[in-house]
Amino acid sequence: MKTYDLVIIGSGTAAMVAAMRTRAAGWQVAVIDFRPFGGTCALRGCDPKKMLIRGAVTVDEAHRMREKGVEGALHINWPGLMAFKRTFTDPVPEKQERRYAEKEIDTYHGQARFTGRNTLVVNDTHIEGRHILIAAGAQPIRLGIPGEGYLADNEDFLRLEQLPRRIVLVGGGYIAAEFSHIAARAGAEVTILQRGARILKQFDPELVGWLMEKFLEIGVDVRTGTTVDAIEKTGTGFLVHTSAENGARTFEADLVVHASGRAPALEALDLDAAGIAHEKGQLKLNEYLQSVSNEAIYAAGDAAQMGPPLTPVSSHDAKVVVANLLEGNRHKPDYRGVPSVAFTIPPIAAVGLSEDQARRQGLKFRMQSQKASDWFTARQAAEKIYGFKVLVDDATDRVLGGHLVGPHADEVINLFALAIRHNLTAEDLKTTMFAYPTGASDIGYML
């Protein structure tokens, strides 16, 4: 049996951070993954998605500027865009493994399974770790409907060699919103089926309402209050059977994509064999990201599910875990001011408290909210969808929440995040001289 100071399950952002930092401290480290090394963000999520979005953004910008000095029509060549994406994703696994090899970090390919409190088996190899970090990421939740096996997931979508003509997305979160904006601009007929009353429930409902105008403009058919009951395979595609308040309906599709949420990827690990407490598919952790029932076990990122399911959180969690491993449990994760963005076109972004959260907490605050289609930032981009909602505490003048939709929202939200995390006041932001004209230069008028 091979013995290590730290064994890491998963090879994404959290794994890389934890492996490199503990190895630098002289620890013997191993990393295990049954998939190509690199993790969800680099291979199956954020980064490849953003590369596809770049093509969609380019087409959208040209379309908006037609008859405004820009002539001619652009279109997306899907195989070409996919080839561009692969220029980033294809080299990642080899680069990751080379980095590990250079640092004398052992790598194992296969599904890890616990055999004891600090022992694992990978294929036929038995491994012992003084400490074990679960950083296995997340996977699509089970829907429990007939024909569920016909659903494509985010990974399937991001490696499509040809774009299907008719795409149905089951769910209304980030994946549905972002993929629909890519696919529709590439020429697909896209339908979103959302069980809830609205899509993008993680964002301010008023701003989502403004963004819905864009979904309508690009031809995405959004059906809220619609439950998917079954998926049926036909000779030419799929039938998606649904029910809603106004009755049952069937949608035809060439591809049906799971966009109904993700959960920690824990099932194959056999947590019970290691005495790792879990409940409803989630690890039970203390405030130091350590298992409450097995002190050898820590978790980070989506597997921990203590903070928002975002890549910067995975990195942050890993740093906290490493500090606790090296120095003893003294460090706790700090999720203040973590911004979240749905990369629709234009993007929608949020950080801090929502209006509803602030009211439920009984806070006294002032709020500025406006659909600002006539502001220069919107007009210079020929984009009608632009608006904001900002909450500022009455007593302290500190920013409580920032909510943006429109051009540059994905970048400007970071300045609101900075303010929240470092207790800057609205006055601090208003008296900062930002470059003009930029998205950031609008901040003073939002406060």
Image (cartoon, rainbow, N blue to C red):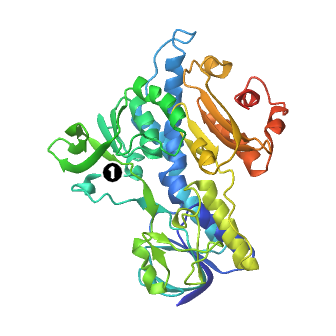
Helix, strand or loop status at disc 1: loop
Q: Look at the picture and state if 122 lies above or below 423.
A: below
Please identify the residue farthest to the bottom as the structure is shown.
1
x, y percentage for residue 252? 22, 38
Q: Residue at x 35, y 39 (%)?
A: 224
Viewer can see residue 295: yes
Q: Position of residue 62 (x, y in %)?
A: 52, 20
In the depicted view, which residue is nearer to us: 71 or 238?
A: 238
Give the total number of marks visible in the rendering: 1
Q: Position of residue 340 (x, y in %)?
A: 59, 46
Placement of 286 over or under 261, stated as above or below: below
Front residue (pair 110, 444): 444
Which residue of the protein is positioned furthest toward the left in this rendering?
235
Q: In which quarter of the image is residue 445?
A: top right
Is residue 96 depicted above or below 324 in this figure?
above
Residue that appears at 43% across and 69% down: 281
- Residue 153 on image: x %, y %: 37, 52
Q: Mark 1 points at which residue?
A: 152
Q: In which quarter of the image is the C terminus?
A: top right
Q: Residue at x 52, y 18 (%)?
A: 64
Taking the image as shown, residue 95 lies to the left or right of residue 239, namely right
Q: The residue under label 1 is which amino acid type?
A: Ala
Pick the front one: 287 or 134:
287
- The image quadrant of residue 376 is top right
Observer able to see residue 98: no
